[in-house]
Image (cartoon, rainbow, N blue to C red):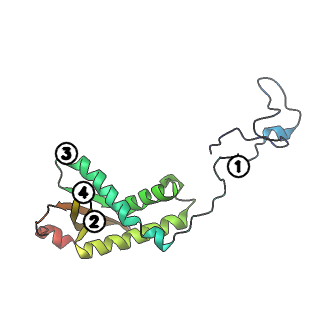
Amino acid sequence: MRFNGAAPLLGGQGHGVQNYPTGNQRCQNTSCLLLRMVRPAGGIDLTMESPDVSHSALAAIPSSLRTMLEELAGHAEDRGRCSLLISSNSLANRFILERWGIRPSQRKRYRSLYAAVRRHCRTLFEYYVARGRFEWKDGAGIHVWGVYKYDRVRGNMILGFVRIPDGTPLFLSRRRRQRA
């Protein structure tokens, strides 16, 4: 755990460390060896309450998917790739990190939050596979991506996204249609 300042010792007042022995000095009482976990002013909250997962929060997941696609598309064009693979769990992890600042390494602590968001991401991915496309409008125009199911591993759904140029009808190859 990180603190903005040092945590005071038991029996101490305010921030900082009091009565801390250095080198060969002996501690007068055993309470100086035990650290007290406090929330310093402006520090992080040590309570482990899970954030509420509201419907309005879950409605922001497609915008997170859109930004993820835009970022990955820039990297994929440099490598000459035409399709991008995104898993439902990676989308959920990214969304939780952007929305609440909770890292994937804290997944056990926020078990119910991760379960709810991952479940919603899988449902959203199933919707996009059934629809066969993901699109949005912005100042640059309409962006259309073809969607196909790449794989499903232990509940983690992996989708393939293919950029569809403007005015081109959406046709996926026969192989990709059979996977879906």
Residue 76, horizontal then vertical, whole percent: 22, 49
Q: What residue is at 51 percent from the left and 72 percent from the top? A: 54
Q: Which dot, 4 or 1, sits closer to the camera?
A: 1
Cβ atoms under marks 3 and 4 closer than 8 Å: no
Q: Which dot, 4 or 2, sits closer to the camera?
A: 4
**Amino acid under label 4?**
Leu
Residue toward you, 161 or 178: 161
Mark linked to residue 151: 2
**Amino acid under label 3?**
Arg
Q: How far apart, in angstroms, are the residues tagged by discs 3 and 1?
A: 47 Å
SS assignment at label 2: strand
Residue 119, horizontal then vertical, whole percent: 43, 71
Mark linked to residue 84: 4
Q: What residue is at 28 percent from the left and 52 percent from the top? A: 72
Considering the image in quadrants, where does the N terminus appear?
A: top right
**Amino acid under label 1?**
Arg
Q: What residue is at 22 percent from the left and 68 percent from the top? A: 148
Q: How far apart, in angstroms, are the residues tagged by discs 2 and 1?
A: 45 Å
| Disc 3 target residue | 79
> Looking at the picture, does residue 13 appear above or below residue 128?
above
Mark linked to residue 39: 1
